[in-house]
Image: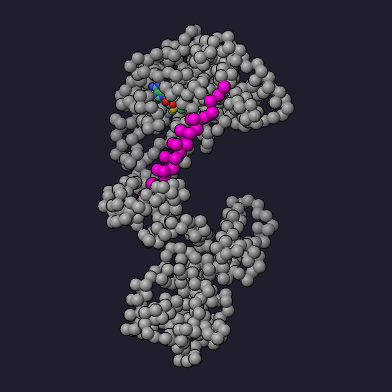
Amino acid sequence: MVEATSKIPVSQIIPDGEIYPGNHALQRLPLKDIAPSPYQQRKRFDPETLKELAQSILHDGLISPILVRPSGDGFELIAGERRCRAIRDYTNRQTIEALVIAIDDRGARRLSAAENLHREDLTLFEAIEAIVEIVDADLIDNRAYGAMGTSPVDRVAALLGKLHAITNSKDRGSQVSREGELLLDKFIQQVEEIFKKLPKPLEWKSFYRNDLHLIVDTAEEVREASVRHTLNKSQTRALKKLHRVSQGRFTALIRESTGPRTGERGSDEPSPGTGSLGDFSAAEIEMIAEKEIRKQALAEQERAREQVPLLSKVKALVMNRLGIPTEVIAANLGINRKTAKKYGQGTMVCAAVRRELSKGLAVPVIAGKHALPEPLVWSVALEGKDDQDRFDALGWKVRPWDYWYWNNCDQRFGDDWPGRIPAQMIGHILYYFSDQGNLVLDPMAGGGVVADTCLAFNRKCRSFDMEHRPDVRPEIESHFWDGDNLRWPIQGTDKPDLVIFDPPYFTKKSGHYDAKGISGRSREAYLDFMGQFLSLTHRCTKPACRIALINADWRDFQRTPARDEMRRKAILIREYLEILDQSGWEETHIIQAPLSSERFTGTMVQAMQKRKTLGVISRYVIVARKSE
Ligand SMILES: C[S@@+](CC[C@H](N)C(=O)[O-])C[C@H]1O[C@@H](n2cnc3c(N)ncnc32)[C@H](O)[C@@H]1O
């Protein structure tokens, strides 16, 4: 039996102060007559805190009544589930003070969600879910909106996603479709209003970008860890990233971080059992994820190096088209000279490629169909063309100035190799400083981008590297430039017209190359090597030979504020210019060819800004000729 007590203003109880029309009265209701709210988002109720709440209600009374609406023979709860549970489960009371209001489903949903948003113990996810509930409750009567998904979160994500894309396009000045305009007209004002009227007003775009995705696609274990360690939004986002990158590393981190952290702050790895996850900043968790990404990229590179071995016929053809002498081909492939010559000419293979080209097949398709390296097919496809036509055919534009920047390496040329340079840069060096048929030397060839580009530009090329990969890169001959005993690897009278020298930039990427190489040497030994190498190259190349030295300033900037860097540790471009000069070379051009700043991740940038670290992304192509 419902017992009316007194009337109080609804605005005292309804969280955002909205007054709903109709009757409302404060009444004492039997708990058994109150059905739970179908809109309750909250899933966890901690028994300990419920017991505490029950004690406080017994002691001080119920500070604010629960909110219900009539439903069937009884009532349906709108707000106050914790209070109901505390009294029902932990006291002897059978009734509870309730404010009974007449309200429709939409209003009940909204109030229930808004009441949730006021709770102090709300988890990050519950707060986002409550906002989704409010938005969905306000829009669900609209048919177009209702058709956007089967659950509130699907619908809200779909609508905000569309509005986000449309408004971004408009901001950029792009054309928006008619449907887009209609959608915007229909919803934008209402959405802005809803977010403005939230208990804590919020920008809908910021909610879409920063919050919503946390409940859309966050794995249950990430949610659980986030709630257990009361992580904030950025920490959760970073943890989610780690989980996506490596579930193994995620699990290890959760396992390891069980107690208060005692380890040194700033190190990116927690020591086992000594950290609580909540003690790690978002940046630190993200650093762990970034480290995993780098590890996986390295493993991917390793896999890429294990490419499918080429047939001897194809190897000999590639080598021959690069002008490698038949005796070298024979010796390197372990076949006799006659076979090396026959394979090298590759009459049948080239005829097949030309046939396919005449049928209009694209170069990559032919390469795939005949299991040939794409640069080899380009070398056939571009026969007889001048350099400008080759640029056009490859879809490159000649840069007629001394600033060469490319966002990405052209994947058609060269392997994924640590320190890989863009083929476009090699194309420009060849274009400006060599002619077709010239011999190019690449003494430290790495992933083979120079040889590949030479194939496309009809240059001869001898490539060398201490890393030997005869199965996939037969044209890169095995040669170790020994700083204590330098040896010129090209026998006979053939002398290079152009040297493209892309050495390791001192110790940068030293972990990626064999330690016996020059990046494993001391600063003095590295510079000494440069002097000896450039002198030897001066002696063994044609009089009109040019050298294109690709390098960057090497500064000890990692973890060091710019002001604390030590000049004596650095190797600046000036040093290379001096060594060139001392070795008989004079520079004719210093071309800027910057590295992409994308190699600094957001987290790294933040850390660098904090420490005032000044990174290096400048890179140069120093072109020199022999001094007169
Ligand atoms: C910067 S990478 C070249 C990258 C290449 N230009 C590319 O785009 O793929 C430098 C190369 O020098 C090689 N190297 C370093 N020291 C060497 C040495 N002493 N003798 C031969 N090769 C060496 C390394 O193996 C590495 O492949």
Quarter of the image where one finds residue 430: top right
Front residue of 316/590: it is 316
Q: Is residue 280 visible?
A: no
For the point 44% across and 40% down, which residue is it?
A: 296
Residue 555 appears in the figure: yes
Up the image or down, 185 lies above or below 400; here it is below
Coloring scheme used:
one colour
Residue 509 lies, in percent from the top left, at: 39, 32
Q: Quadrant of residue 140?
A: bottom right
In the foreground, 81 or 543: 81
Image coordinates for residue 342, horizontal then vertical, percent: 61, 12
Vertically, is 174 above or below 87? above
Q: Main secondary structure of the magenta part?
A: helix
Which residue occupies 57% across, 16% down? 320
Q: Is residue 297 left or right of residue 279?
A: right
- Please state which of residues 458 and 547 is positioned toward the viewer in this rendering: 458
Q: Residue at x 43, y 86 (%)?
A: 95
Instruction: Locate ligand 1 by image quadrant.
Output: top left
| Residue occupying image coordinates x 62% and y 62% | 148
Residue 307 part of the magenta segment: yes
Q: How many marks?
A: 0
Q: Position of residue 304 (x, y in %)?
A: 50, 32
Q: Residue furthest left?
A: 262
**Magenta segment boundaries in residue numbering:** 284-311
Q: Quadrant of the C terminus?
A: top left
> Farthest right residue?
359
Q: Is residue 355 magenta?
A: no
